[in-house]
């Protein structure tokens, strides 16, 4: 494995901004193909988040969304709510890694007096779109010419093949066992079964079920893989000062981090093939928060495949590199008994594939004490975002 | 965003960024872009060297490498692969610079005989898909080999 200095870096973030908190959360139903558009889903999530914060659409004076999936942007906001007021905007929010960094953008806008209440929204309707192949993770990738010419013709496509290759290399380097990948899948399913909104609610799964599941690409099993879903969520970020007068327990944004690999956006070429840029992101977020991994009460990470969870658990500092397989065995990840309650809503594997936005919502619920699989006395909740060559970290705490 | 090219998933051999790779394969040569001024191999191909902006020249390499990782694909993710599964797609790290990893097929061996980091050697074979009848592109594939010539 290359030295860390050789393969990536952290983004420098300002730890001195006026403190902010997540004050409102909103979710739609999480489903298989619903027939709805992402725009409709985004509008519903936004509406619910604004209401949860005790606000009206006219109070929202900032909005962030994902520029790569601009289904619910500022224009959609105004059209849906019939508003026309000036808003601070950024297309560098939404889901995936940006679900963690959107509160930092909001903090900058709030700190600079450009906004008071900033909405971050991310909807997706890939389950509905999959039928016509007009969306979804595979098609996005196949459209890139380098992949079309140098990866797809050789069968190195799509995401299950990339992550199968990472999984095998992790087994080669660290001796990770199938059952250790399975421990991630089982913990996520266990939590989904406690979560009425989870797509896989009511479908229990054991480690034996995991081992018996078919391979998509050996050694990656169907149950190592995330769902494809329709759904969305949104949250409102406000100054901590204002948040104290709002209806909900504030989820204070204590630390944010962002890290990049310098190997570019192609999985095949990542120099640190079995690591994520959490190596660069997480330390900054914990430092900003004045906390360490040992202080974390609940961890949610972007988990498209089980190996991505193992890598992030290591790279965020919850166990030494190469030891996540042994670390996650047994009840480690369980919400009620484990030393690291993990993806307590079920994650992308068993809750819904809404690209990380529901992970942040789950962290907020845990801090409010209202999560379906509630971690007792949750004080610190962390989201680890991952988008290939980029990772991000969001440390949320109770108002301390 | 849908793929319109009727020979997909064969490579587009006319794409200027990657055309020399396939032209080389048609001549039994494995060519990788290398910077004229700093000598670094640059993979994937780019317009110029990301290190110093130097011109990139498609340069023959030995065709030797090691098997970095591989997937035994069992489900076809595209219609073209339905009659191919199960197949082995691999990342091969080249001897000249192991940071250059090729996505490729490992052929002439059974998946259970593959060994991590073992030596492999290039072989040039026609790539064909029954979904793209009558078309064929020569591409580098790999077979188990020896570390030194």
Image (cartoon, rainbow, N blue to C red):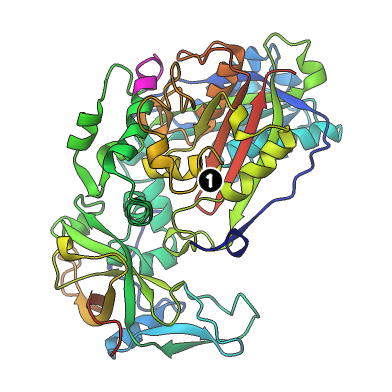
In percent of width and height, residue A174 lies at 38, 52
Q: Which residue is mark 1?
A: A315
Give the magenta range. Answer: A190-198
Residue nearest the viewer, comparing A189 with A236: A189
Q: Is residue A356 above or below residue B3?
A: above
Q: Is residue A267 left or right of residue A329?
A: right
Where residue A32 appears, as percent x and y from the top left, is 33, 28
Q: Say which quarter of the image contains residue B100.
A: bottom left
Horizontal placement of B120 versus A283: left or right?
Answer: left
A39 is higher (above) or lower (below) than A7 = above
The chain containing the residue under callout 1 comes to A
Asked if the magenta segment contains residue A193, the reply would be: yes
Taking the spot 53% from the left edge, 31% from the top edge, the residue there is A357
| Magenta span contains residue A316 | no
Residue A231 or B135: which is nearer the viewer? A231
Q: Secondary structure at mark 1?
A: helix
Residue A5 location, quadrant: bottom right
Residue that appears at 23% across and 80% down: B145
* Magenta: main secondary structure: loop
- Asked whether, in this view, residue B32 is left or right of residue A60, the answer is left
Which percent across, then down, holds residue B14? 38, 79
Q: Where is residue A397 drawn, in percent x and y?
A: 67, 23
Say whether residue A367 is visible.
yes
Q: Residues within 10 Å of mark 1 (few under 14, many from 20)?
A: many
Note whether residue A65 is visible.
Answer: no
Nearer-the-camera pick, B4 or A125 = A125
Which residue reaches farthest right? A113
The residue lying toward the viewer, choosing from B136 and A318, is A318
| Position of the C terminus of chain A by quadrant | top right
The residue shown at (75%, 23%) is A238
């Amino acid at each position: 494995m290359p030295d860390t200095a050789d393969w990536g870096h952290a983004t420098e973030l300002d730890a001195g901004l006026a403190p902010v908190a997540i004050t409102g959360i909103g979710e739609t139903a999480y489903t298989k193909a619903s027939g709805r558009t992402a725009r409709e889903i985004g509008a519903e999530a936004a509406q619910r988040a604004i209401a949860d914060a005790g606000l009206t659409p006219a109070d929202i004076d900032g909005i962030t969304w994902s520029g790569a999936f601009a289904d619910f942007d500022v224009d959609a906001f105004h059209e849906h709510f019939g508003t026309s007021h000036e808003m601070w905007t950024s297309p560098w929010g939404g889901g995936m890694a940006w679900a963690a960094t959107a509160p930092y953008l909001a903090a900058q806008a709030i700190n600079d007096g450009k906004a008071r209440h900033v909405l971050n929204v991310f909807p997706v309707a890939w389950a509905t779109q999959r039928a016509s192949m007009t969306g979804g993770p595979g098609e996005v990738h196949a459209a890139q010419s380098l992949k079309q010419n140098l990866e797809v013709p050789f069968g190195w496509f799509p995401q299950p093949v990339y992550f199968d290759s990472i999984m095998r290399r992790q087994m080669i380097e660290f001796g990770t066992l199938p059952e250790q990948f399975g421990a991630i899948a089982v913990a996520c399913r266990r939590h989904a079964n406690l979560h009425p909104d989870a797509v896989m609610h009511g479908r229990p799964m054991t480690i034996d079920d995991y081992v018996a599941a078919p391979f998509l690409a050996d050694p990656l099993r169907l149950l190592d893989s995330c769902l494809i879903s329709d759904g969305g969520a949104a949250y409102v970020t406000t100054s901590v000062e204002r948040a104290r007068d709002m209806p909900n327990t504030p989820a204070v944004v204590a630390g944010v981090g962002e890290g990049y690999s310098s190997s570019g956006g192609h999985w095949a070429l990542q120099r640190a093939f079995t690591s994520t840029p959490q190596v660069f992101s997480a330390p900054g977020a914990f430092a900003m928060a004045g906390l360490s991994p040992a202080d974390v009460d609940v961890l949610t990470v972007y988990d498209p495949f089980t190996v991505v969870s193992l890598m992030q658990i290591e790279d965020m500092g919850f166990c030494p590199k190469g030891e996540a397989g042994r670390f996650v065995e047994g009840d480690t990840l369980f919400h009620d008994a484990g030393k690291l309650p993990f993806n307590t809503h079920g994650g992308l594997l068993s809750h819904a594939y809404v690209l990380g936005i529901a992970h942040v919502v789950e962290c907020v619920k845990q801090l409010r004490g209202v999560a379906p699989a509630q971690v007792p006395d949750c004080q610190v909740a962390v989201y680890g975002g991952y988008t290939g060559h980029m990772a991000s970290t969001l440390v949320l705490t109770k108002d301390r | 965003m849908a793929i319109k090219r009727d020979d997909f998933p064969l490579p587009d051999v006319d794409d200027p960024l990657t055309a020399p790779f396939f032209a080389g394969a048609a001549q039994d040569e494995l060519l990788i872009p290398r910077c004229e001024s700093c000598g670094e191999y640059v993979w994937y191909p780019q317009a110029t060297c990301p290190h110093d902006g130097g011109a990139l020249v498609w340069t023959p390499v030995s065709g030797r490498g090691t098997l970095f990782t591989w997937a035994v694909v069992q489900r076809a993710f595209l219609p073209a692969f339905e009659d191919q599964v199960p197949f082995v797609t691999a990342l091969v790290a080249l001897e000249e610079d192991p940071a250059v990893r090729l996505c490729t097929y490992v052929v002439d061996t059974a998946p259970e005989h593959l060994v991590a980091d073992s030596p492999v050697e290039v072989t040039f074979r026609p790539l064909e898909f029954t979904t793209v009848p009558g078309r064929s592109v020569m591409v580098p594939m790999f077979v188990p080999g020896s570390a030194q010539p």
